[in-house]
Every structure is written in C-alpha cells, then in structure tokens.
Amino acid sequence: MSTTAERMRAWRGPAILSFGFRPFFLGAAIWAAVAMALWIPALTGALDLPTRFDAASWHAHEFLFGYLSAVIAGFLLTAVPNWTGQLPIVGWPLGGLFALWLGGRAAVLFSTGLPPLAVALADLAMPVALTGFLAREIVAGKNWRNLIVLALLGVFTLSNAVFHIEAAQSVYAAQGYGLRTGLGVALMMIAVIGGRIVPSFTRNWLVRQNPGRLPVPPMQRFDKIALLALLAALVAWIAAPSTRVTAALLLAAGALHLVRLARWAGDRALAEPLLWILHLGYLFLPLGALMIAAGILLPGLLASAAALHLWMAGAIGLMTMAVMTRATLGHSGQALHAGRGTVALYAALVTAVAARFAAGLLPEQASTLYAISGVTWCAGYAGFAMIYGRALVCPRSER
C-alpha cells in the first residue's frame, strides 16, 4: 500500500476501524455523556461509584485523561499520516488501540477491587502505545517540526501517571500536580495546534466567502512570545498555584492570547459556526487565565473550581467538540458547514460552561446551576453521538 486512501480501501472489516478519528471520536463523546451522567448522582450522594478515586478526582480524571486522551488519539491518528506522509493505523491494530482505551476506562471506574498499579498500567497502556506509534512515524517521516506535539503527549502521559500515584497515596488528586500538569499540557496543545488550525481554517473560508481582512499568518514572532508567556504562566501555576507571581504571569499570558485571537479575524467568520466555535473555544484559554489570576489576587471573588472550568469545560470542551465535528464532516465526505443540529450541540456546551461558571458566582443557586450544566453537557455529547454516529460507523456509500 502506497497511500492512506489505498490502505483504507483495502480494509474489509467494520468501517469504524478504517480511520483513527472514527472509533475514538465516537467513544470520547459517548464517554463524556456517560461519565457526566454518573457524576451528577455521585455528586449528590445518590450513587457510590466503585472506584478507588474520590468522586471529584474520578470526575476530573475521566474528563482530562479519559475523554481528552481519546480525542487526542483520534486527532493525531488522523493528522499525523498527513504530516509525515506515513501510512495510518487501520483495522484490527486500530481496534486494539481503542480496546486499550476502553480497558483503561473500565479499570479506573471499577478500581475498588484492583491493585492501584494494575489500574495505572491499564489506564496508561493506550497513551503509551500511541506515543510510541507517533514517535516511530515522526522519526520515519523526518517530520521534526511536530516533535513538540510528541513531547507534549509524553508529558501528558506522565502527568496521568502522577495522578495515579497521588490517588494511591490518598492525596486529593483533583487538586494535585498530576491534574495541573495534564491540564497545562492540554492548554499548550490547544495553543500550539489551535494556533495553526484556527487562523488557517478561517483564512481558507474567508478567501472563498468574504474577501477582505485575513488572519495574520500563524507562528510569527508575536505568536512565539505569546506561547512562551503561556508556558511560563502554566509552569508557575503547576508549581505554585496561589502566588502573586503566578497571578501576574497568568494575567500577562491571558492578555497576550486575547490579542493573538483578535489577530485571526474571527469577527469576519461569524456566518459559519464551524469557524466561530473554534474562536470561541480558544477564547476560553485566555479567559480562564485571567479569571484564575483574579481568584488569586482577590480571594473570595470566585470559587477556584469555577474559574478552572473555563479551561476544562470551556477551552478543552469547546475546542475538542469543534475539532470532532469539523473532522468528521470533512473525512466522511460531507460539506464543511454546520447544520442546525451541530449548532444545537455547540449551544448546549456553551450553556454548560456558562452555568458551571455561574455556580461559582452564585453559591445559593449552585445546585440548580450544577444540574443545568450537567444536563446540557450530556445533551451536547449524546447529541454528537446521535448526529455524527452514522458517519463514524458507516462507509461513505451507506450513509
């Protein structure tokens, strides 16, 4: 086989195993909805989850290292063959990688009766295998430009291991080094990869639809300064999350990334939801930095968890949903345009983020706002599985 298309056509098994984004995007969406549906009764005490983790740590872990690891796998298994010119993983090897991810979810959820080391090994198996595959492809294709993505994935995997160590030591892992490091890496991935695709996709659309002012080309000197500022702020936040120095660095990084986003001409692409959701998702990266800094400098102004969810549910949730919908449409041969159903998914997730943030400002209404946030979150991801499931499971000829 000499091309990606030839390898995909040669596969005669289930269509869902014909491309990396198919099983992982569908699995990620279903798990995001199921995990939230379990978390809501666990939060109220109505359900006792069979996991060694405390409920809050399980919730945080399964979003960051469960859901997000699947989205990262689906994205990279689809993108890396294009970056390197190497052939993609298809068929049963892809199915095996997905089975490792499923095994990790089951091991963590039902970890009460399992040794902590066994749970950690089961959960880390997929990201370790994925890192190894990507390293081989990047080296074979001499695609040195994307070594930064490989390095970020490696640190993300190590942060998951730290999370397991902290949980095994009865540390409140939801506020530990593992979670902060994993979140920091995820935000750097958004800043690096989003900094390539958001202005690129916006430029391509504007050239065809709305000639005029275009996004500034990515990775200019200003972008590099903004990325270094964000890296410094995140390292400080991981090491010392409550100091004034950290707050100052977060303020600087937030301001720089607001300017960076403004340079991408998102205001001229409001007619296409596939584009404005990318810009809106990226907006939550600097907003989260600014709100976390405000919480440090003005204690009592805002619950730290509410500000943190601007990064978790806002930046990560919206950006990944944006990438999953766009990639599924494009790779399944459909027009790159968001229909009403897709817009409803975006609206559900925006509502979930807004309600969760508002719960930190209005503690007397927190229980109601938590419920609204959880229900709309489930609706968004269950809706993705319903609207895009057929495109992910069926060959193009059968849709």
Image: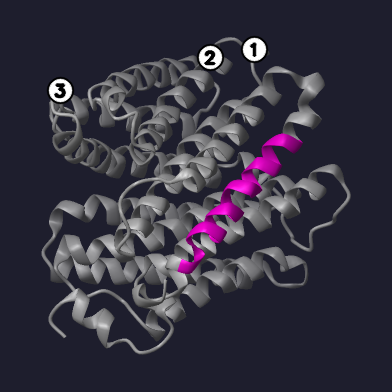
Which residue is painted at 60% across and 32% down in the image? Answer: 351
Query: In terms of secondary structure, where does tag 1 sit?
Result: loop
| Residue 183 position within the rendered picture, expressed as x and y whole percent measured from the top left | 48, 42
Q: Which mark is residue 213?
A: 3
For residue 189, above or below residue 146:
above
CB contact under 8 Å: marks 2 and 1: yes
Gap in Å between the C-alphas at discs 3 and 1?
39 Å
Query: In terms of secondary structure, where does tag 2 sit?
Result: helix
**Residue 81 versus residue 235: which sits nearer the camera?**
81
Residue 329 belongs to the span the image colors magenta? no
**Residue 73 versus residue 209: which sits nearer the camera?**
209
Residue 383 belongs to the span the image colors magenta? yes
Gap in Å between the C-alphas at discs 2 and 1?
8 Å
Residue 94 left/right relative to 373 = left
Residue where numbered disc 1 is placed = 301
Which quadrant is home to the N terminus? bottom left
| Residue 392 position within the rendered picture, expressed as x and y whole percent measured from the top left | 44, 68
Badge 1 crowding class, 10 Å Cα cut-off, few under 14, some 14 to 19, many 20 or more, is few
Gap in Å between the C-alphas at discs 2 and 3?
34 Å
The residue sitting at the right extreme is 46
Q: Report if residue 216 is visible in the image.
A: yes
Q: Which mark is residue 294?
A: 2
In the image, the segment drawn in magenta is 371-390
| Residue 128 position within the rendered picture, expressed as x and y whole percent measured from the top left | 41, 68
